[in-house]
Amino acid sequence: MDGDYVIGGVFSIHSNMHTAKHNYTTMPEPLSCAGSINPRELRFSRAMVFAIKQINNSTELLPGIKLGYEIYDSCASVSVAVHVAFQLSGGLDPVFNTGDKCSQSGMVMAVVGESGSTPSISVSRIIGPFNIPQVSYFATCACLSDKQQYPSFFRTIPSDQFQADALAKLVKHFGWTWIGAVRSDSDYGNNGMASFLHAARKEGICVEYSESFFRTHPRSRIQRVADVIRRSTAKVVVAFISPGDMRILLEELSIKPSPSRQWIGSESWVTDRDMLRFSFCAGAIGFGIEKSVIPGLRDFLLDLSPFKVADSPLLTMFWEEAFNCRLVKSESTDRSVCDGTEDIKTLQSSYTDTSQLRITNMAYKAVYAIAHAIHNAVCQQTDSTTQCVRFTKLEAKEVLNQLKKVNFSQNGYDVSFDANGDPVATYELVNWQRNESGSIELVTVGKYDSSLPVGQEFLINRNLTWVEGGTQVPVSVCTDSCPSGTRKVLQKGKPICCYDCTPCPEGEISNATDSFDCFPCPKEFWPNAERDLCLPKPVEFLSFNEALGIVLAAFSIGGACLTIITAAVFYRHRSSPIVRANNSELSFLLLFSLTLCFLCSLTFIGAPSEWSCMLRHTAFGITFVLCMSCVLGKTIVVLTAFRATLPGSNLMKWFGPSQQRLTVVSFTFIQVLICTIWLVLSPPFPMKNLTTYKERIILECALGSALGFWAVLGYIGLLAVFCFVLAVLARKLPNTFNEAKLITFSMLIFCAVWITFIPAYVSSPGKFTVAVEIFAILASSFGLITCIFAPKCFIILFKPEKNTKKHLMSREKM
């Protein structure tokens, strides 16, 4: 249609073109389209015509100015798009050539189109040097935002850069970290997928495969891509594909059953209603341009009749394909003639379906954007009226400059361009859902707005259905998430999403899923069994509440009671010959010290405290020295008594009761002095032992000064050895003085116990160190009371006839 100012339009009304064979000897055949008409693209072109008619009837926008249009079919081909671009730039075209002069119909103020990114790039490179603005409604390649290469390019649809970021965030939102990727082998697919993969890597998403193809590739290439999808382990496939390419791929996948896949679609195909016939893609989700309403468009689209259609070759072809008949003027011979009963209102086609006006609105807004630019260039606002100069010679460059400034609202939809010629990116999240009748329909389930703050771009306001009609979000991961208590170890040669879950090392935890590192617990804490929480280490010490502590305490008290009973027996028979013959005073003192020895072992049981630590070692040292002093005194008495019976000996004069007491006090005082120095300089103290066991704390008494401890033990050992030597010397005395033999056996047991104690004490861990020390105390104490006092008590209680002076004196003669 001619007009004062002409707008060009380029649409991929056909999806293929005839392949010409060049022999380079004759002129090649003119370029021509092949295949059937794309009803959706036809609707886009008709929306352009509708918008221009609306503008021509408007009294506010370009009043008195008539817009014309030239609409071309690019056949979705770069070569045809290039040819069209030259026509729009003012070149010769057989259709508009009228003799020797070129018609002005070839001069356009701006161009609407193209659908595909690759043809749009070609068109922009040709018309750009002529400063002819191009406004695309469907070319989304992010590369077209480069104003250095495409200075005259604008678009009403958001750039794929926004869509790629949105798709990556969508995949991350549902927890898919292992995906497949398929793209068109074109500028749209390659650039869009490159942007998506870059954004996906930032989100920690791994790609199992990334395949590309184009609809003109051999079928073997398409089959290979389909086989990769079938064999893959990724349950989610992101497809950055044009509708024509996607249709071929889905047809190939439908031939041979394949595992169910969750499809994530780019805007170009996921909102194409022709794709809904592929039922195995039910549950697909993706982003679409916002659904819109264009008042009057449906009536305009349906205002077709055989008479009106006959004036347009494209509409004629569409009519014949839609109703499978031929118009009278048509050259088609393989169809019957249309009988006139055909009604386009009854036609089920993408052309007549206006329930999902998305890209159609982009084409509609593109026309209005150009119209506003022309309006701002040729019209002036005076008072309340708008005056437009109809015959102003308008250059395309002026329209280009004005197009950069447009900012208006049409049917409630804002239109403006940023510095890159892009609009504000807003998308609807759409989902392929089955309705009650079993057919698949597009359902808007959310929204994405790139202008909102990070993390708030998504709004999902409806339940989604997934692959095979599921209601649970499908899982697509290379490796299941590593639970708390484990860490991720990457598998060699595989993406970061493929890893092994290794339990945290001993003493370390991870309290988050998919942790790369485990962290050590504080010194006084230890991991639980799951290694996801640090718990306070159990504090361990020899307690009165545990079996070992109860047994040792029972033996300690039992030993003390036994000693007291022995003392009571001796006191009851203190005037008997056997008691008097064995130095009753030292015997009672020995029994008293043994009682203290038994009882001092109780100080080793229970939680160590500052006082108990000092008491247990000093009490042990002093009581045992008192015990050894008594035994040593008894041994000396035996030897002295034997020597005193020899003629001329007066030894008993020098070792009477006073000297015996002094000996006991002197030896004990030395130990008291050693303990006092130890306590003053470096006393024992309670300590938390964190090194013996990693998983628990041993509460024990530190020695303070190891020298002090071994000095105490050494002094006891010295007395024991000295006593043992004297007892050995006295073992062959007459039977009347046979207590020396008992002392010898007791000292033998005592020394054996404490010699064994040293390595056992050093090597025993934790509370068993204390148990070994208690055992040594009890064993040596029981050894002393058994060897020294048990034979005497046996005679006193069970053999009283032997408890006489005559019997004792007669044993020598026997």
Image: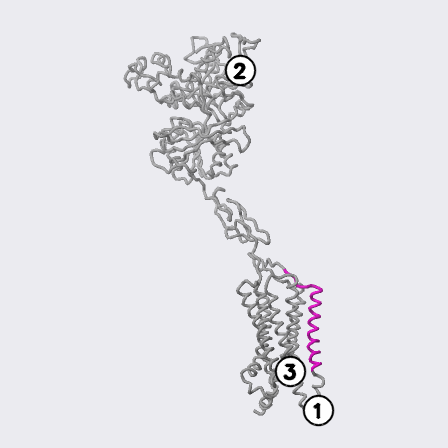
Measured Cα–Cα span from mark 2 to mark 3: 133 Å
* Residue 648 marker: 1
x then y, percent, for residue 91: 46, 14
Residue 669 belongs to magenta span = yes
Q: Are circles 1 and 3 on residues that touch, CB within 8 Å?
A: no
Q: Amino acid at mark 1?
A: Gly
Q: Foreground mark, 1 or 2?
A: 1
Asked which secondary structure carries label 1, the reply is loop
Residue depth check, mark 2 versus mark 3: number of the one nearer the observer: 3
Is 716 drawn above or below residue 200 in the view shown? below
Residue drawn 63% across the image and 59% down it: 687
Question: Closer to us: mark 1 or mark 3?
Answer: 3
Residue type pointed to by label 2: Val
Please identify the quarter of the rendering in which residue 753 is found. Answer: bottom right
Residue 20 in sight from this viewpoint: no
Q: Which mark is residue 262?
A: none
Badge 2 element: helix
Residue at mark 1 to residue at mark 3: CA–CA distance:
23 Å
Numbered tag placed on residue 399 in the rendering:
2
Task: Please report contact status of discs 1 and 2: CB closer than 8 Å, yes or no.
Answer: no
In this picture, which residue range is highlighted in magenta?
657-686
Q: On the rendered image, what quadrant is the N terminus found in?
A: top left
Determine which of the numbered discs, if any, sits on residue 583 in the image: 3
Kind of residue indicated by mark 3: Asn
Where in the figure is residue 150, as x and y percent of width and height?
Answer: 52, 23
Q: Residues within 10 Å of mark 1 (few under 14, many from 20)?
A: few
In this view, the residue in front, 244 or 603, is: 603
**What is the C-alpha distance between the residues marked 1 and 2?**
148 Å
User: Which one is in front, 442 or 333?
Assistant: 442
Mark 3 residue element = loop
